[in-house]
Image: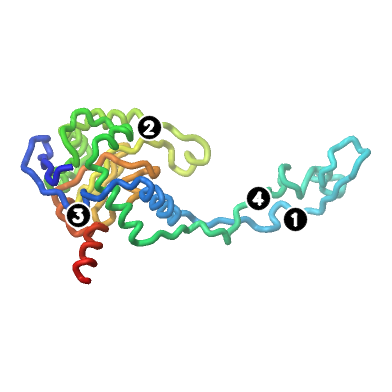
Amino acid sequence: MTNKAKALQIDGTELHTVALPPVFETPFRPDIIRRAYTNLLSHSFQKQGRYPMAGEMVSAESRNTGQGIARLARARGEGFARAGQAAEVAGVRHGRVPHPPESWKKIYKKINKKEKKVALCSAIAATARRDLIENRGHKVENISGFPIIVSDDIESIRKTKDLRKTLSALGLAEELVRADFSQKSRSGVARRRHRQARSAVSVLIVVGNDEIIGRLSRSIPGIDVKQVKKLSVLDLSPGSKPVRLTIFSENAIKQLNDIKTPLQTVTEMIHRT
């Protein structure tokens, strides 16, 4: 991989050459990326549990054999609808849950700081590899080189139509079509909770300042805008599968120089000794 890349204007024309930060020299480690993704994703989980006596607060007993009915526990009494119905056991209406979730279960998975740092650096470096991006399914036939670096003018875009126009000028018109056609309607609980549709993950725009363009995040299906300081493995490797098609602004590239790679940290430790 070269240490320099072309910077483009928002209209797709070449601007100048930019020196890449040392983070792009990090080796590709899909195993560490997957582990970091799994552990970081667990930090967003909410604990849940069930009342221990749920489904069992009923007076029920089995009628034993010889009645021509199943030997399930049945509600006691007569003269009301619930009498004689199966109760208190798993697999019946109004019965208990066989193995309900329990609130004491540990679902928060910890991760080492260094391991998290290696995963993030590796995921950022992978955005410069065409083979990984194509294997992920992104349409990048019209893009000449990676990583994709754009002038800071992209951070000043205010309207969705201007952002779509810019992405098309950068050679991502087919990628936008892929994301548009990937939308699928949901039904059931997800729809009732205002998650009516889902779409494929598309371009990630990494900027230094998201004060203006950050409002356009998710305005186009699959398009996300993220600030460098808030960048995570969850953004760069959705589903723990590296890597995502990413666009960097020049300001973001400059801020990536502040990230010390694991190799730089080891070198500093050697020089200190």
In front: label 2 or label 4: 4
Earlier sequence position, callout 1 versus callout 2: 1
- Which quarter of the rendering shows the C terminus? bottom left
In front: label 1 or label 3: 3
Please report contact status of discs 1 and 2: CB closer than 8 Å, yes or no: no
Residue furthest toward the bottom? Answer: 273
- Which quarter of the rendering shows the N terminus? top left
Residue 91 image offset from top left, x and y in percent = 71, 42
Residue where numbered disc 4 is placed: 99
Viewed as shown, does residue 67 lie left or right of 56?
A: right
Please report contact status of discs 1 and 4: CB closer than 8 Å, yes or no: no
Residue where numbered disc 1 is placed: 57
Hey, what amino acid is under mark 3? Leu
Residue where numbered disc 2 is placed: 183
3D distance between C-alphas at marks 1 and 2 = 45 Å
Earlier sequence position, callout 2 versus callout 4: 4
| Residue at image location 68% in from the left, 48% down from the top | 98
Q: In the drawing, what numbered circle is on residue 256?
A: 3
